[in-house]
Image (tube, coloured by chain):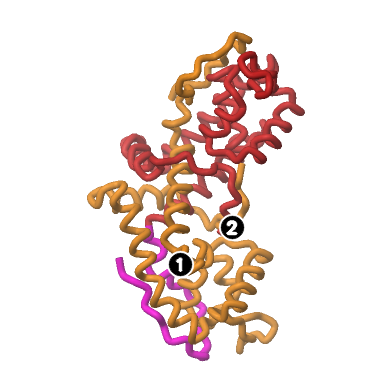
Chain colours: A orange, B red
């Protein structure tokens, strides 16, 4: 990978042509970020009618598959900070999709469940999620999809990382 | 891809074992997000001594390679919102790494340049960036790196997307 050649910063008027990315567009980290933003954009479009964001989706899937597990366990598994998870659950409760109950084994902690409406809501998610998956798979080609997932897992291993951090920069 | 099977949300005490991700961990979009967060985490570790975030790095690389181009062009090429770009440039100016000058062709707009200190700073970035790239490449294996970049570009094409949005959820 070519390094950053420090360029003389002259005062002459530059051209109007396309910008020189200086190798940036072939950096793995940069490509990962662009791809992930494109994926999020498609997720939001696919789930717009259901008014659901990626992290909310992940939380609903985990509660659905693990009813009664503690709030702290679900948050940790997804790498969501406690304070963010609390407001996320507040919203899912407000929408009557999920609920906190006092855990039987430890009355000081909360066990999470989908509500009956939440269980019904899960059934609606499949079509939107399939649309999103199909979009991504079509971009890379079906034959490359499994390898791509495998390579991404190798990069992502060692997590969880914070799914919900404002990682703007 | 198996759909979300809505599970009965019983009140019995769940096990303490590992959580059932119900296919989520094999979803391309989810794997992309986890990999991207792992990449950011390594970027921050690699660039900690230089106190540089990924978006700041991208902006410096683009200014270095395109001295004198308009602020609006650099922001658009990286998909950074105008308001975020202004505060980002404020910080780079405060650190004396880059500067805005009035554009010769249009005095109402700003042309961006690295300062002399910024040009010197670019030379320090190579080692940190190589460390970051080597880390990612080692994770996926050198022989898979080019294909991975190609597949990520296919997903990311159609951008730019907003590099700096708070895409927490």
Q: Residue drawn 46% across and 52% down?
A: A41
Direction from residue B103 to residue B36 in the image, left or right? left
| Range of residues picked out in magenta | B1-27
Chain assignment, label 1: A
Direction from residue B117 to residue A133 in the image, left or right? left
Q: Is residue A100 above or below residue B18?
A: below
Between disc 1 and disc 2, whose residue precedes?
1
Which residue is the site of mark 2? Answer: A164
Q: Quadrant of the rendered structure where residue B119 is?
A: top right
Q: Is residue A134 above or below residue A104?
A: above
Q: Inspect this view and state whether residue B34 appears.
A: yes
Query: Which of the numbered marks, if any, corresponds to residue A49?
Result: 1
Q: Quadrant of the N terminus of chain B?
A: bottom left
The secondary structure type at the circle numbered 1 is helix
Residue B155 part of the magenta-drawn span: no
Q: Quadrant of the rendered structure where residue B71 is?
A: top right
Depth order, front residue of A39/B31: A39
Q: Quadrant of the rendered structure where residue A72 is?
A: bottom right
Q: Is residue B36 above or below residue B78?
A: below
Direction from residue B151 to residue A67 in the image, left or right? right
Q: Residue drawn 60% across and 51% down?
A: B166
Depth order, front residue of A19/A155: A19
Looking at the rendered image, the disc whose residue lies closer to the viewer, 1 or 2, is: 1
Q: Position of residue B149 (x, y in %)?
A: 37, 38
Q: Is residue B33 above or below residue A76?
A: above
Q: Does mark 2 fall on the same chain as mark 1?
A: yes
Binning the other alpha carbons within 10 Å of mark 2 as few (below 14), some (14 to 19) or many (20 upward) gives some
The secondary structure type at the circle numbered 2 is loop
């Amino acid at each position: 990978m070519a390094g950053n050649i420090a360029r003389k910063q002259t005062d002459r008027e530059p051209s109007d042509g396309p910008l020189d990315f200086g190798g940036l567009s072939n950096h793995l980290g940069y490509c990962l970020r662009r791809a992930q933003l494109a994926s999020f954009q498609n997720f939001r479009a696919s789930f717009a009618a259901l008014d659901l964001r990626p992290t909310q989706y992940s939380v609903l899937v985990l509660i659905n598959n693990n009813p009664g597990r503690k709030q702290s366990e679900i948050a940790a598994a997804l790498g969501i900070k406690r304070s963010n998870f609390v407001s996320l659950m507040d919203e899912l409760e407000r929408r009557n999709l999920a609920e906190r109950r006092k855990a039987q084994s430890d009355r000081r902690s909360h066990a999470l469940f989908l509500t009956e409406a939440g269980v019904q809501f899960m059934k609606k998610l499949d079509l939107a999620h399939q649309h999103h998956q199909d979009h991504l798979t079509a971009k890379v080609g079906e034959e490359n999809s499994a390898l791509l997932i495998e390579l991404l897992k190798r990069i992502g291993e060692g997590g969880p990382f914070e799914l919900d951090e404002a990682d703007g920069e």
